[in-house]
Image: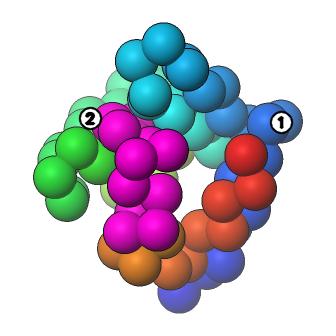
Amino acid sequence: MTHMKVSSINSKYDERHDVLHVFFGSLANAFSEEEFPGVYIYRNDDTDEVVGMTLMGYKERHRKIAQWLPQYEFNV
């Protein structure tokens, strides 16, 4: 399992809607799946590599999200 850091450099937080958008690569040619409630993971169509994610209700559920996605270090 690869450990990846999530910071303000590769993410954008929408405070009004409490949504965190994370980008690891281009979302062009990507598909998303809801892997956990309110957690959408974007994967490259060709390689299945994770290229981004959208986390709904991030501040409200950041501890639970960290448990669901232990391979990501959230520093936002």
Residue segment shown in magenta: 52-65
**Residue 65: image x %, image y %?**
40, 63
- Disc 2 marks a residue whose amino acid type is Phe
Residue at (16% x, 52% y) in the render: 37
User: Are the residues flagged by discs 1 and 2 in contact, CB closer than 8 Å?
Assistant: no
Q: Mark 2 points at which residue?
A: 31
Residue at (41% x, 78% y) in the render: 67
Determine whether, in the image, residue 41 is placed left or right of residue 71.
Answer: left
Residue at (60% x, 36% y) in the render: 23
| Residue 63 in magenta stretch | yes
Instruction: Check the image and report above or below for 60 versus 69.
Output: above
Q: Name the residue under label 1.
A: 9
Q: Can residue 61 be seen in this view?
A: yes
**Residue 11: image x %, image y %?**
67, 34
Looking at the rendered structure, the secondary structure element under dot 1 is loop
Q: Where on the picture, by quarter, is residue 74? A: bottom right
Instruction: Say which of marks 1 and 2 sits in front.
Output: 1
**Residue 12: image x %, image y %?**
65, 26
Q: How far apart are marks 1 and 2 (CA)?
A: 22 Å
Instruction: Check the image and report above or below for 69 versus 15.
Output: below
Q: Which of marks 1 and 2 is nearer the N terminus?
A: 1
Instruction: Check the image and report above or below for 69 versus 8.
Output: below
Crowding near pointer 2: few (<14 within 10 Å), some, many (20+)? some
- Disc 1 marks a residue whose amino acid type is Ile
